[in-house]
C-alpha cells in the first residue's frame, strides 16, 4: 500500500475517485505477492502493480468499470506453463485480484 499511498492521497485531494485492486491469492509462480496493489483514478491514472503484462491492462479496465458502477469484482487469472511462454507470461502462475472502489 505504501507504494501507492502518495498517489491515492493526491488524487483524492483533487476530488478524483479511486479504485484499488489487490492480489488476494496466488497459486504456483506469480509475478507479485499477495497484498500487491494497483490504484486507478477515474482520470485514468495508475499507481502500483498487481502483475504486469496483459493481466495489468485487464485489471485496469475492470477498475474503470468498478468506478462507474461501484460494484466490487473478484478476478481470477491463470495460464498453463506451456501457454505462458507463447503469450509472454512465463511464470505460469495463477492470481486472484479483488477490485473495489475506495470510499471516503
Image (cartoon, rainbow, N blue to C red):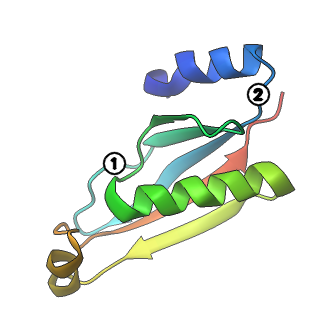
Looking at the picture, how far across and down is residue 87, in whole percent? 23, 76
Q: Quadrant of the C terminus?
A: top right
Q: Quadrant of residue 11?
A: top right
Answer yes or no: is residue 70 visible. Answer: no
Q: Is residue 97 visible?
A: yes
Q: Provide residue 63's location: percent of width, then percent of height.
A: 65, 52
Image mark for residue 66: none
- Direction from residue 82 to residue 15 in the image, left or right: right
Whichever of labels 2 and 1 marks the residue nearer the N terminus, that label is 2
Q: Residue at x 23, y 68 (%)?
A: 89
- 18 with respect to 88 (left or right): right
Where's residue 88, x and y in %? 20, 69
Query: In terms of secondary structure, where does tag 2 sit?
Result: loop
**Occupied quadrant, residue 8:** top right
Q: Residues within 10 Å of mark 1 (few under 14, many from 20)?
A: some
On the image, numbered disc 1 is attached to which residue? Answer: 33
Residue at 68% from the left image edge and 36% from the top image edge: 43
Q: Where does label 2 land, which residue?
A: 16
Position above or below: 83 against 104 = below
Instruction: From the image, state whether disc 2 or disc 1 is nearer to you.
Output: 2
Q: What percent of the width, then of the height, locates residue 64?
A: 68, 52
- Residue closest to the eye, 91 or 33: 91
Give me the residue at 43% from left, 24% from top. 3
Is 40 in front, or is 4? 40
Residue at 53% in and 58% down:
59
Are the residues tagged 2 and 1 within 8 Å (C-beta)? no
At mark 1, the secondary structure is: loop
The answer to whether residue 102 is left or right of residue 41 is right
In the rendered structure, the answer to whether residue 32 lies left or right of residue 22 reads left
Amino acid at each position: 500500500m505504501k507504494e501507492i499511498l502518495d498517489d491515492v492521497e493526491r488524487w483524492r485531494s483533487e476530488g478524483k475517485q479511486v479504485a484499488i485492486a489487490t492480489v488476494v491469492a496466488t497459486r504456483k509462480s506469480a509475478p507479485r505477492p499477495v497484498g500487491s496493489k494497483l490504484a486507478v483514478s477515474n482520470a485514468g491514472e495508475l499507481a502500483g502493480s498487481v502483475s504486469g503484462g496483459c493481466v495489468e491492462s485487464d485489471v485496469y479496465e475492470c477498475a474503470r468499470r468498478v468506478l462507474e458502477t461501484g460494484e466490487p469484482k473478484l478476478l481470477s487469472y491463470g495460464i498453463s506453463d506451456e501457454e505462458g511462454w507463447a503469450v509472454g507470461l512465463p511464470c505460469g502462475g495463477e492470481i486472484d485480484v479483488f477490485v473495489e472502489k475506495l470510499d471516503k
